[in-house]
Amino acid sequence: MKFFYYKKYIKGFSLVEVLIACAIMATSVLALMAASTNGIQLSNQTLKQTQANFLLEEGAEAVKSIRDESWENISNITLNTDYYLTFNSGTNSWSLGTTPVGAIDSLFTRKVVFSGVSRDINDDIVSSGGSYDDDKTVKVIVSISWPSTQGSTSSRDLSFYISDIFN
């Protein structure tokens, strides 16, 4: 008898309850989609930054390789001028040129700038006002730039000094 009593007073979901449940589910799905979209964008941005870091390191090693072939490859360049690295697979060697090369992976642009070095009386490198210019050392700045997703340009720089270590 109790079974019929409960069945008589138990009613189905009302339309309002169904709409509220649907709204909660839709909001949850939209929130998950937004979170996954942000995660994919951050992952893509991190990938580009990692590639840029590897290209900076490759640029530094390429400049050292050019120096190791002959210091004259470095000492004969024009300071404070943009140079671009190219790799010759026939000779397995790097070279510097002032003509821009195509974008690396159709995205990244790499350039190298050399500048002179001044030293003080203690032979320490100084930014300005040194006692003499050191013609056996140059400062190298390798730069990588690429378009970002916001329409601007992102860039990274790596600066270091190289010297004529063979003379």
Image: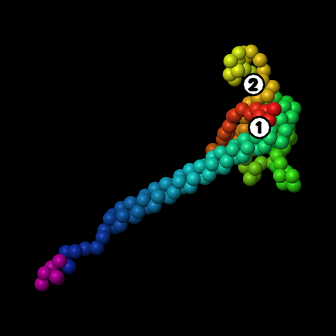
Q: Which residue is mark 1?
A: 112
Return the residue nearer the eye: 8 or 145.
145
Q: Which residues are magenta?
A: 1-6
Which of the marked residues, 2 or 1, is nearer the chain's N terminus? Answer: 1
| Label 1 element class | strand
Q: Residues within 10 Å of mark 2 (few under 14, many from 20)?
A: some
* CA–CA distance in space, label 2 to label 1: 16 Å
Q: Which residue is mark 2?
A: 117
Return the residue nearer the eye: 43 or 118.
118
Q: Is residue 130 above or below residue 54?
A: above
Q: Is residue 121 above or below residue 35?
A: above
Horizontal side of 46 relative to 95 (left or right) equals left
Give how far across and how far down residue 26 sits, in percent.
Answer: 44, 61
Q: Amino acid at mark 1?
A: Val
Give how far across and how far down residue 48 sits, in percent.
Answer: 64, 49
Horizontal side of 19 relative to 62 (left or right) equals left
Residue drawn at (84%, 31%), measured in percent from left and top?
75
Quarter of the image that includes the N terminus: bottom left
Badge count: 2
